[in-house]
Image: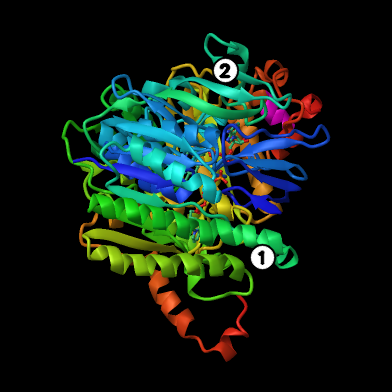
Amino acid sequence: MIVSSWGRYPKVETADVKRLQWLHEKIDFDPEKRYLAYGMGRSYGDSCLNEGGTLLMTRGLCRFVSFDPETGELHCESGVTLREILAFALPRGFFLPASPGTSQVTVGGAIANDVHGKNHHVAGTFGCVVDGFRLLRSTGETLWCSRTENPALFAATIGGLGLTGLILDVKMRLRKVRGPWLRTETIRFGSLREFLQLSKELAPKYEYSVSWVDGTSSGAQLGRGLFMAGNHADVTVEEKKEPFVPKVAFPCEAPEWLLNKLTIRAFNALYWRKTLGERVSGLQHYVPFFYPLDAIEDWNRMYGKRGFFQYQCVLPFGDGEEATAEMLRRISAYGKGTFLSVLKTFGDVRSPGMLSFPRPGITFALDFPNEGKETLDFLSMLDDIVTEAKGALYPAKDARMAPKMFEASFPRLNEFAEHVDPRFSSSLWRRLGGTHVR
Amino acid sequence: MSDNVIVFGATSAMALGAMRRYAAEKARLVLVGRSPEKLDAVRNDLLAFGAASADVVVADLSDLSAQQGAVDAAWAKAEGGADAVLVAYGSLPDQAACQADTDLAVREFNNNGTSAVALCNRLAQKLEERGSGCLAVISSVAADRGRESNYLYGAAKAALATFVDGLFVRLSKKGIRVIDVKPGLVSSPMTAHLKQGPLFAKSDAVGAAIHRAMKNPSFQGTLYVPRVWALVMFVVRHVPEVLFKRVRF
Ligand SMILES: Cc1cc2nc3c(=O)[nH]c(=O)nc-3n(C[C@H](O)[C@H](O)[C@H](O)COP(=O)(O)OP(=O)(O)OC[C@H]3O[C@@H](n4cnc5c(N)ncnc54)[C@H](O)[C@@H]3O)c2cc1C
Ligand SMILES: NC(=O)c1ccc[n+]([C@@H]2O[C@H](COP(=O)([O-])OP(=O)(O)OC[C@H]3O[C@@H](n4cnc5c(N)ncnc54)[C@H](OP(=O)(O)O)[C@@H]3O)[C@@H](O)[C@H]2O)c1
């Protein structure tokens, strides 16, 4: 069976797919086979793929175990999605304490990539709000992992790319909110410098922030963009709606000509003008603020059948600032970077995972349609800039970095490798794990 | 006022969607199914969603000799009787295997047809005695026409659907609402092995629609979910046999 991730590249032949439905059902691990959990497949590259191996589909593990309306502690199975948690939590006055830019991910996937959200500078990563989880190892043994029980396995599994075993069920803390609304502010900036200034100024004022940057602008306009920030609003509005269901779906694979320099440039220019004034503020529902892309189901089809790459790096403050500007210059000259260029600063809340990606600095994410060697060469060139500036790449979005880059990005790789389950593996791990791969 | 609800086949994914809505309204639920471990997981889920209580009755509903016991046990747990009953259990047989093995075919027919008819007959007696309430039974769009790929299942569901149809007329005179739920294709453990095209609905959404219908005091009769299936099946029912023979689906 052919399986791919959100980036639709690569597409790999998977020997076997097991759909898990119930937590108590035993899995017989064949010593000859290699296993990997697969949640919603919202990773972009090959971290959720297992060519020639077995995928354990976790979506059927979708039940809640308990919820404490006093403390907000939620215990649920690992295939529950963040969207389901939100639909559950909001009417009860709670919200996710950390969430990526799509709600269509599972709790297990959110842990395995130790995902970050717009409030990273305040709350840290998803792993920071996880109290513990039960991990199934291929020996059949299940282990409760937390900061006090099996702490090393806890740290290895958070951001552990699914390689330490199967996360069965999870305990995490939700946070209280008054309702689904946010007070948001959108501010235009004209350069990278202005972006950094805004980030510094507004970080203490806003719990959430993210910026869109125009990857096509150059010269004096290089690094222009929109800074979007928000706080939970202190207004109670009855949640009348059912869980959010997208109204539009991208109907089919788009033809290759749809995305070209012209349409991309036009889109970016339009988007920049979207904000009428320099500063616009208002009350916004959480869905368009947190999950703007979830409004178009299957938007990844827009990139056609060859799929696309997302490139996300983090660069330390200081030296990384010039490196970010350099990357923007190269991207603008290349002209193929598209709509979803996102800029954000990570704070210094420590991630609990050995292989967690977020660290203090500037993170930058951008999509590139897959045009074969040309695209790959360009991205390798960006790698050089990132390495030079002592930055790192996000494995959840990678399909092509070199093992050297991976090693440089994760100084605790050796320590992590000791916790990898010998029967678990992924296409990404075989590509990047080097001598650690068994 | 929150309801007393009994669900037969409470481990069904579709039923979960309906039961979570009842739970959020603080209903008292009684869960009947054949796997204690699965029932336990569902019970915890519903308590997390806010159910006032969730009691479990373990029974294989295809076992006709145990059925009355299960009905009585469930009724006793739903103190004051059930305001709403959902019959959700069923199994999707391998049509080819049934063709080759008549015993298997009969067992499957019993599970989806005979035993469900027997159960509904017992439930009708209980509800009639009580004089109010709602009974929803999940049959299938497969009941509307025999398709080459699953006519054994379709035939059993047709028996059930026709039975429920008659029951609807009988009990409507007593102020009891009967609903024949006919889902189209739904993603659930039952269909997990099939290739899931865009026609597949989410079990949670189907469950929500079932709950909505059960709570709607003016709704009774047949419920196609998602609704487009009413139109689709209208057409399918009217396709002349010469043509029906040729389309493969
Ligand atoms: C539109 C969009 C926006 C995004 N925005 C962000 C963002 O802002 N921040 C961010 O950090 N990420 C972001 N992402 C990436 C996404 O959050 C992560 O890739 C996430 O891990 C995907 O979860 P999933 O359930 O789809 O997991 P999958 O992609 O299916 O799997 C991801 C990894 O988790 C492992 N895994 C899954 N379930 C389990 C389990 N039960 N036990 C053990 N391992 C498991 C898999 O083996 C794999 O290694 C975004 C993705 C999209 C499509
Ligand atoms: N999915 C579809 O596309 C579809 C379409 C039309 C109609 N339906 C009908 O919808 C209903 C719900 O199905 P679903 O989609 O929710 O699938 P499901 O999750 O597999 O639910 C079916 C449930 O019925 C239980 N069950 C079967 N036989 C039983 C018995 N003899 N005693 C007790 N419990 C029994 C099963 O329990 P175990 O897990 O313990 O076996 C299972 O949990 C079924 O009646 C089905 O026929 C389904």
Q: In front: A241, or B54?
A: B54
Quadrant in the rendering for residue A415: top right
Identify the subunit bearing mark 1.
Answer: B
Q: Measured along the vertical axis of the image, is residue A80 above or below residue B135?
A: above
Q: Measured along the vertical axis of the image, is residue A148 above or below residue B140?
A: above
Q: Measured along the vertical axis of the image, is residue B119 above or below residue B58?
A: below
- Which quadrant would the C terminus of chain A be assigned to in this image? top right
Which span of residues is magenta-colored? Answer: A403-407
Name the residue located 36 percent from the left edge and 59 percent from the top edge: A247
What is the total number of numbered labels drawn onto the structure image?
2
For mark 2, does the 10 Å Cα neighbourhood hold few (<14), some (14 to 19), or many (20 or more) residues? some
Determine whether, in the image, residue B233 is placed left or right of residue A200.
right
Name the residue located 57 percent from the left edge and 59 percent from the top edge: B110
Determine whether, in the image, residue A434 is placed left or right of residue B158.
right
For mark 1, does the 10 Å Cα neighbourhood hold few (<14), some (14 to 19), or many (20 or more) residues? some
Q: In front: A14, or A75?
A: A75
**Which numbered circle lies on residue A216?**
none
Quadrant in the rendering for residue A39: top right
Q: In front: A191, or B10?
A: B10
Determine whether, in the image, residue A77 is placed left or right of residue A430.
left
Task: Find residue A344 and report its horizontal and vertical position in percent.
Answer: 42, 33
Q: In front: A26, or A92?
A: A26
Q: Amino acid at mark 2?
A: Trp
Task: Find residue A325 and report its horizontal and vertical position in percent.
Answer: 49, 36
Quadrant in the rendering for residue A222: top left
Identify the subunit bearing mark 2.
Answer: A
Q: Identify the element where label 1 is drawn.
A: helix
- The Cα–Cα distance between marks 2 and 1, rounded to whole angstroms, is 43 Å
* Secondary structure predominantly adopted by residues drawn in magenta: helix
> Pointer 2: what residue?
A144
> Pointer 1: what residue?
B95
Task: Find residue B39 and report its horizontal and vertical position in percent.
Answer: 49, 36
